[in-house]
Amino acid sequence: MAEEIAGRIFSTPEEAGVTRPTDEEIAHARKLFDEFQERIDNVPEADRLTEVSSKFFDDVSGTEYEGRPRSPEELSTNG
């Protein structure tokens, strides 16, 4: 049964009607990832970002989980 947590819906692939990708599709995706990683690796160290905005990874802002500790480390320091 699909479950909603923090505004996101989680379900099994079967519930979502998703089929497993073919071996060819997986190989193509891996090739694309490898090409992208090569481009990333070719960026000079001086031009690489050292800090990323939280808007790219903060999935709990504005949900019922906002402000709650997210990791065991946060639990022990905020507990």
Image (spheres, rainbow, N blue to C red):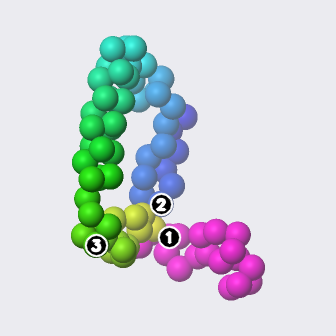
Residue 7 locus on image (x, y percent): 42, 58
Judged from this view, the residue extending furthest toward the bottom is: 78
Q: Which residues are magenta?
A: 61-79
Q: Residue at x 29, y 23 (%)?
A: 28
Q: Earlier in the sequence, mark 3 or mark 2?
A: 2
Q: Residue at x 32, y 67 (%)?
A: 45
Q: Earlier in the sequence, mark 1 or mark 3?
A: 3
| Prevailing secondary structure class for the magenta stretch in the rendered image | loop
Residue 77 is covered by the magenta coloring: yes
Residue 18 appears in which quarter of the rendering? Answer: top left
- Rendered-image quadrant of the C terminus: bottom right
The label nearer to you, 1 versus 3, is 3
**Residue that label 2 marks:** 6
Residue 30 appears in which quarter of the rendering? Answer: top left
Residue 60, above or below 43? below
Residue 17, above or below 51? above
Q: Residue at x 44, y 46 (%)?
A: 9
Are the two marked residues, 2 and 1, in contact with CB atoms closer than 8 angstroms? yes
Residue 61 shows in the view: yes
Viewer-closest of 2 and 41: 41
Specify few, some or many for label 1: CA neighbours under 10 Å numbering under 14, 14-19, or 20 or more: few
The label nearer to you, 3 versus 2, is 3
